[in-house]
Amino acid sequence: MIVEAIAADLTDPRERALVELRLTDPDRPVELLVNNAGTECPEVFGAAALDSLLYEVDLNIVALMCLTRAALPDMTARGRGAVINVASFAGYLPPGGCAYGASKAWVLTFTDTVAASLSGTGVRMLAVCAGRIRNEATSAPERSPLWLTPEQVVRSSMIDLAKGRTLSTPGWLYRGLVSVLESPRSALRLAAAAAGRGRERCARLPDS
Ligand SMILES: NC(=O)c1ccc[n+]([C@@H]2O[C@H](COP(=O)([O-])OP(=O)(O)OC[C@H]3O[C@@H](n4cnc5c(N)ncnc54)[C@H](OP(=O)(O)O)[C@@H]3O)[C@@H](O)[C@H]2O)c1
């Protein structure tokens, strides 16, 4: 796999456009787009500067949507390719008072919606719902199911992508929590599917 680095501030529309252009180049097809860039405005909503909040929305939402939109036409034309959107467990249980969780909830719903529209195209889309990830800067306890390693997150995401899943939740603790939080949504999806099948049956009934 060839990994290409392009330096760009994805919140700047002109710099973002250069990355979008690269993604649409049919002579150099992109197999996998990972929308990882993200930021968290640390202040509570009421105390945050408008510029910081808009920066968060531009990076976590607008850039992710624009890059996905740029990458998909070529992928669907080739019948292969994948997009991984890095969301967060905060999309399910937002941390107090800031807008980060809302932006990640958007990523989860966006991925769900677009993945459904890609059914049968050969192109896959996955949201990664990661909990806390340790890095050199974090002083996380050595052994705690709350803390994931970057390797754990990547391995779990690639396995779930290969299985054709649209959501990957690395780590048993977060997986358990998400399955509980997801169950009302799953029930609604099943009910909607059943209602759809019912409507199809009614439509097929001969006129009496
Ligand atoms: N850390 C966690 O515990 C955790 C948990 C769940 C989800 N996440 C998500 O994982 C992703 C990565 O987070 P991280 O913890 O690795 O954060 P990080 O260390 O702050 O890295 C952020 C990444 O986004 C890039 N970036 C930031 N602003 C950008 C901009 N304006 N234009 C282009 N790229 C920009 C950075 O690039 P440069 O290095 O070039 O600045 C860096 O690669 C984010 O989407 C985050 O929400 C993190």
Image (cartoon, rainbow, N blue to C red):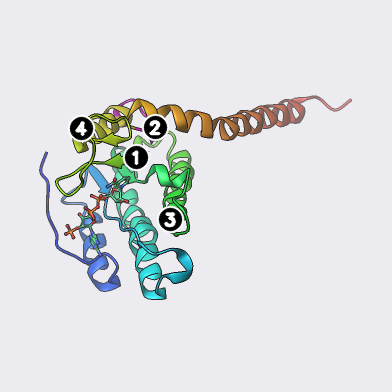
> Mark 1 near ligand 1 (CB under 8 Å)?
yes
Magenta stretch: dominant SS? Answer: loop
Q: Who comes first in sequence, dot 4 or dot 1?
A: 1
Mark sitting earlier along the chain (2/1): 1
User: Dot 4 surroundings within 10 Å: few (below 14), some, or many (20 or more)?
Assistant: few
For the residue marked with disc 2, what is the amino acid? Tyr
- Residue 207 rendering spot, x and y as whole percentages: 85, 28
Residue 82 seen by the camera: no
The amino acid marked with disc number 1 is: Gly
Query: What type is the residue that disc 4 sits on?
Result: Glu
Residue indicated by mark 1: 131
* Residue pictured at 48% horizontal, 28% vertical: 179
Residue, disc 3:
103
Q: Which residue does the numbered mark 4 point to in the structure image?
A: 142
Q: Which residues are magenta?
A: 162-169
Q: Nearer the viewer, mark 4 or mark 2?
A: 4
| Helix, strand or loop status at disc 3 | helix
